[in-house]
Image (cartoon, coloured by chain):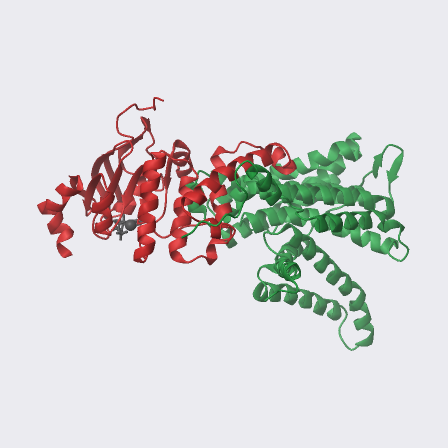
Amino acid sequence: MSRIPFYPPSGVYSDSYRKDMRIVKTGKQRLMAIAGLVFLAALPFIPGLNAPYHLRLLIGIGIAVIVALGLNILTGYCGQLNVGQSAFMMVGAFTSGMLNAYWGWPFWASVIPGGLAAAGVGVIFGIPSVRLKGLYLALTTLGAQIILTWIALYGVTVTSAGFTVEPVRLGGIVFNTPQKFYYVALAFTLGMALAAKNLMRSRLGRAFIAIRDNDRAAEGMGIDIFKYKLLAFAICTFYAGIGGALLVHYMMWAQLESFTLQDSVWYVAMIIVGGLGSIEGTIFGVIFITVLKELVLVVGPMAQETLSFLPIGAASGMMLVFIGSVAILFGVLEPRGMAHRWSLIKSFYRLWPFGY
Amino acid sequence: MTLPGGDGPILTCEGIGLAFGRVQALLNMSFDVRRGEILSIIGPNGAGKTSVVNTITGFYRPQQGTIRFNGQDITGLPPHRVAKAGVARTFQNTELFAGLTVLDNLLAARHIFLRSNILSCAIYLGLAEREDIRARQVVEDIIDLLEMEAIRKQEVGTLPYGQRKRVELGRALALEPDLILLDEPTVGMNLEEKEDMVRFILDVSEEKGTTIVLVEHDMDIVMDISDRIVVFDFGVKIAEGPPAEIKKDERVIRAYLGEG
Ligand SMILES: Nc1ncnc2c1ncn2[C@@H]1O[C@H](COP(=O)(O)OP(=O)(O)OP(=O)(O)O)[C@@H](O)[C@H]1O
Ligand SMILES: [Mg+2]
């Protein structure tokens, strides 16, 4: 077997490895990234796109991206199921909200504690993952959803009734409109997505994937799988907590109803459709499902009117079934999610016109 | 450099007993592995070869006996602690990280050498990146040694069987172990692949001075490259010695070699 020199001689090695490991590799990619950022930053001022309805949708997408990123780190990268993500989001939301409403902590001081509280609770519910796998672990996290909701409903008076939370402030600015809060959501979403991307390409991400792909071999290579599974739970639920903290300061109101089992299931659907184990895929999945859900809200009532012979609620019910089917179809036909399609398109584009 | 444990054996197994219910996989098993040697473990199917590898590396917990590595008692330590202590292994039924590339499989095994914490990993630029570049250099050297340059960016799930075995050896080497246990590294390979694997094992032994324990069914390979051989039968050690002696041993011929 002859040796093919793929890399320049040593000395420039470390430099070429650094280039090889970059997220943005080519000048064209850098240009696209900058253009994308400029567009996102300018969006609230672009007529036609800056309707409050659009901005609210985008804020919702941004917060959901953060929560779903956490879930994808745990489920997609580390292989541990979690169907209680919105309950952990609730822990962060109430922690941050109460610190603000009852102790007067500003958003900036209460957002990290919100994430940490969620992570603390998340780790406790992650402990069974040492022994439990797959569906059994899913049951534990389902238990988390039920127990945490029960505590918030019957255990704490404040959280069962809901309470007002102050908007985010910075300098003299109060971020109390969609147009202003959009920037808070954008900054957090980009920051958390970049952090997720970095975590997953570092030693942590490799340890998570190793555990997912082969936990025996991972142990044999010196990875403490118990410690790293718990760490995956901590990161996952930290993201959920940050998302929750953002949500209550955006709505300026904290309530139990924002964190249902149904929401948890949506997060699972988002990462399946987008692509398990993909940061970009998570974003695609959240956008896809959010837009579909929005369609239910719009098309549902319209269908109800035209097809008036149907019982009330049947049309929206059908739409839910429709979205569920889409998620299942993805699971069957494209198990690697939209992210995989995306990478196929990208490589096609890179090779064009010499593809195939 | 003085190693912990001095010039004595790098690994001592003393009176190991391991049972699964009524199956006695290992019985009063004792043997030493000397520093720098290639020691082969042979024996018929079900003799307990894989069991001894699993016991040394912490995957099985023995009911009796002690295992000392570099002077340290490692009996009953979990696998990841044994790996950190400097013992690496490959698996009889190749166990790779299927979704990762060859490069990332090897990088995953550099885990124990990387120190960057969760915050520096999240920021990446700086500490985590520098560490990864250093890890990458070590891993690329191993890729060179095992002649895997052409497949370094391929997902291991897509590789043919013989190459997966090679990746597994590379991943074990990435731990920079003092001792490496290879459980049937040439099983299912064609002649050419076997020759390559044998050459790599000898390279590792000579260039890195790594001590090697080899579980192997191919007698030509065993007789060719072993410094010493231990023979198992029904969980018991029935012979031990250099290849020339083992070839002549009555009990070995009856239990094992006789069939060929
Ligand atoms: N996890 C286990 N549970 C129950 N029995 C086991 C287990 N592992 C090994 N054994 C039993 O222990 C005995 C020794 O098995 P082992 O795998 O060590 O043999 P081996 O020498 O590696 O054989 P081969 O050459 O086929 O790989 C066998 O009888 C086997 O059935
Ligand atoms: Mg075996």
Name the side, left or right, on which A144 lies relative to B56. right
Percent from the top left, x then y, of residue A200?
59, 44
Shade of chain A as shown in the rendered figure: green
Residue farthest to the left? Answer: B250
Res. B122 image quadrant: top right
Q: Quadrant of residue A276?
A: bottom right
* Residue A227 in sight: no
Q: Is residue A313 above or below residue A121?
A: below
Q: Is residue A121 left or right of residue B163?
A: right
Residue at image position (68%, 68%) is A322
Which chain can be seen in red? B
Residue B124 drawn above or below residue A193: above
The residue lying toward the viewer, choosing from A177 and A131, is: A177
Residue A164 against residue B157 in the figure, above or below:
above
Question: x and y percent of residue A220 in the render?
Answer: 41, 41
Identified at 14% across, 56% down, the residue is B259
Foreground: A4 or A311? A4
Residue visible at 61% across and 52% down in the picture:
A278
Is residue B170 shown left or right of residue B124? left
Q: Position of residue A136 (x, y in %)?
A: 50, 52
